[in-house]
Amino acid sequence: MTDEPDSAPTDEPATDGRDVRDLLLRGALLVLSVLAVVALFQFYTSANAAIGEWIGPEFRSLFRAAFNLLVLLATGIGISLVVRELA
C-alpha cells in the first residue's frame, strides 16, 4: 500500500480569484476612463453653450473655470477610487 496523495502537486501558483478581480478592476478603470472622456466632452460643450447663453460676458470665464475644475475633481475622485482598489 502506498501513501500517494489524490492529486499531484503542480508548479502553478494557487489562484484565489485575485487575478480575476484585478482584471475586472482594470477593465472597469478602462471603461470608466473612456466614458469619462466622452461624457466630459459632451457635457463640456453643452455647459459652455449654457454659460454663453445665461451668464453675462464679464462672468463667463469665471464660470467656465469653476465648471472645468468641478468636472476635473469629480473624474479624479472616481479614477483614484478605482486605482486605490487595484493597489
Image (tube, grey):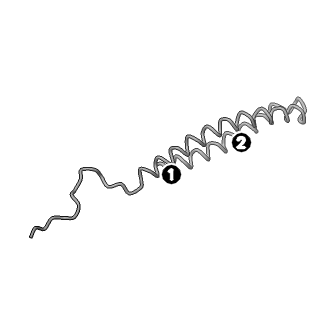
| Residue 30 picture quarter | top right
Q: Secondary structure at mark 2?
A: helix
Q: Residues within 10 Å of mark 1 (few under 14, many from 20)?
A: few
| Residue 32 picture quarter | top right
Which residue occupies the foreground of this view, 47 or 16? 16
Which residue occupies the foreground of this view, 25 or 72? 25
Residue at x 30%, y 52% (from the top left corner): 13
Residue at x 55%, y 48% (from the top left corner): 82
Residue at x 77%, y 32% (from the top left corner): 45
Residue 69: percent from the left, percent from the top? 70, 38
Question: Which residue matches tag 2?
Answer: 70
Determine the CA span between mark 2 and mark 1: 23 Å
Q: Residue furthest bottom?
A: 1
Which residue occupies the foreground of this view, 85 or 39? 39
Residue 73 vertical placement versus 57 (above, below): below
Q: Amino acid at mark 2?
A: Leu
Of callouts 2 and 1, the N-terminal one? 2
Left-right relation of 24 to 12: right
Q: Residues within 10 Å of mark 2 (few under 14, many from 20)?
A: few
Left-right relation of 36 to 49: left
Q: Nearer the viewer, mark 2 or mark 1?
A: 1
Left-right relation of 8 to 2: right
Residue 2: percent from the left, percent from the top? 10, 67
Q: Secondary structure at mark 1?
A: helix
Q: Amino acid at mark 1?
A: Glu
Residue 43: percent from the left, percent from the top? 75, 37
Question: Which residue matches tag 1?
Answer: 85
Residue at x 22%, y 56% (from the top left corner): 9
- Residue 40 bears which disc, if any? none
Q: Residue furthest front?
A: 1
